[in-house]
Image: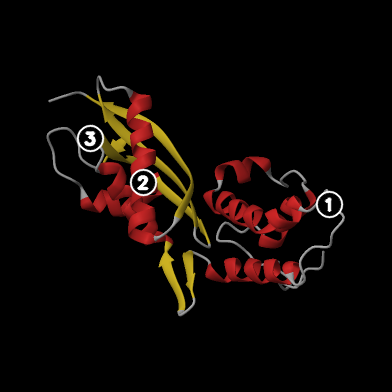
């Protein structure tokens, strides 16, 4: 497969070349850096998007037919668009396109997580946004948004979120509610498809 994305192969925000991920999908090869890809929401979102784009070819792989004309060019054009979009999700309509900054996607995900009963957004470093009996530390939220990390590719989103839960609640049940709530909010409010929502419970809060 030729590389017409330029010398950098279309760099994602994490520094990985989009063309390398496309080769991985097309050739069915293993990741060049499995640890990075497993941890990086940008790579995982892009892989999900490219896998869907290439699915028609895989469906035809066992049939004696040729791939639809222009399919490879269309996929390469999409790879270029993904790389140029950078930190934005892209929704395409007949009348134009809408870009939603990853920061906005992250904000929707955080608010969705906090709307689940018994859940407090974690800030990293063992801290939570709203300590028991306290008020939200807005400065801390601004400085520790890495506790909610998002990867976007086209209309696909991967979310990694850290939370604290109240002592005594069923952690798996609460985590599933967080996943469902984030996916629902991103679908309804932003028109995005959530490929993954990975919830990490980093603390428990004693009931007041």
Residue ID at (12%, 25%): 208
Mark 3, other Cα within 10 Å: few <14 / some 14–19 / many ≥20: few
Residue 4 at least partly seen:
yes
Asked if the residue under mark 3 is in contact with the one under mark 1, i.e. CB atoms within 8 Å, the reply is no
Mark 2, other Cα within 10 Å: few <14 / some 14–19 / many ≥20: many
* Res. 122 mark: none
Provide the residue designation for mark 1. Answer: 63
Say whether disc 2 or disc 1 marks the residue closer to the N-terminus.
1
Disc 2 and disc 3: Cα gap in Å?
13 Å
Asked if the residue under mark 3 is in contact with the one under mark 2, i.e. CB atoms within 8 Å, the reply is no
Q: Is residue 133 left or right of residue 174?
A: left
In the depicted view, which residue is nearer to us: 106 or 177?
177
Disc 2 and disc 1: Cα gap in Å?
39 Å
* Vertical comparison of 100 with 114: above or below: below
Foreground disc of the pair 1, 3? 1
Q: Secondary structure at mark 3?
A: loop
In the rendered image, which quarter contains the N terminus? bottom right
Residue ID at (79%, 63%): 67
* Vertical comparison of 169 with 44: above or below: above
Q: Position of residue 199 (x, y in %)?
A: 41, 36
Provide the residue designation for mark 3. Answer: 117
Residue 126 at least partly seen:
no
Please, which residue is most extreme toward the front here? 64
Residue ID at (40%, 60%): 191
Q: Secondary structure at mark 1?
A: loop
Say whether disc 2 or disc 3 marks the residue closer to the N-terminus.
3
Q: Position of residue 6 (x, y in %)?
A: 72, 73
Please, which residue is most extreme toward the right here? 64
Provide the residue designation for mark 2. Answer: 182
Mark 1, other Cα within 10 Å: few <14 / some 14–19 / many ≥20: few
């Amino acid at each position: 497969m030729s590389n017409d994305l330029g010398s950098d192969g279309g760099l994602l925000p994490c520094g990985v070349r989009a063309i390398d991920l496309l080769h991985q999908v097309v050739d069915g090869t293993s990741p060049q850096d499995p640890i990075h890809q497993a941890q990086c929401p940008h790579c995982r979102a892009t892989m999900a998007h490219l896998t869907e784009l290439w699915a028609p070819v895989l469906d035809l792989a066992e049939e004696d037919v040729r791939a639809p004309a222009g399919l490879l060019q269309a996929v390469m054009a999409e790879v270029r668009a993904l790389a140029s979009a950078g930190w934005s999700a892209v929704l395409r309509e007949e009348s134009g396109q809408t870009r939603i900054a990853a920061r906005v996607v992250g904000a929707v995900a955080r608010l969705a997580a906090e709307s689940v009963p018994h859940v407090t957004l974690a800030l990293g470093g063992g801290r939570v946004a709203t300590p028991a009996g306290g008020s939200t530390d807005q400065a801390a939220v601004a400085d520790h948004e890495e506790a909610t990390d998002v990867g976007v590719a086209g209309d696909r989103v991967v979310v990694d979120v850290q939370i604290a839960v109240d002592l005594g609640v069923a952690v798996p049940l609460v985590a599933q509610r967080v996943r469902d709530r984030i996916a629902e909010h991103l679908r309804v409010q932003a028109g995005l498809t959530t490929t993954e929502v990975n919830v990490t419970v980093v603390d428990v809060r004693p009931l007041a």
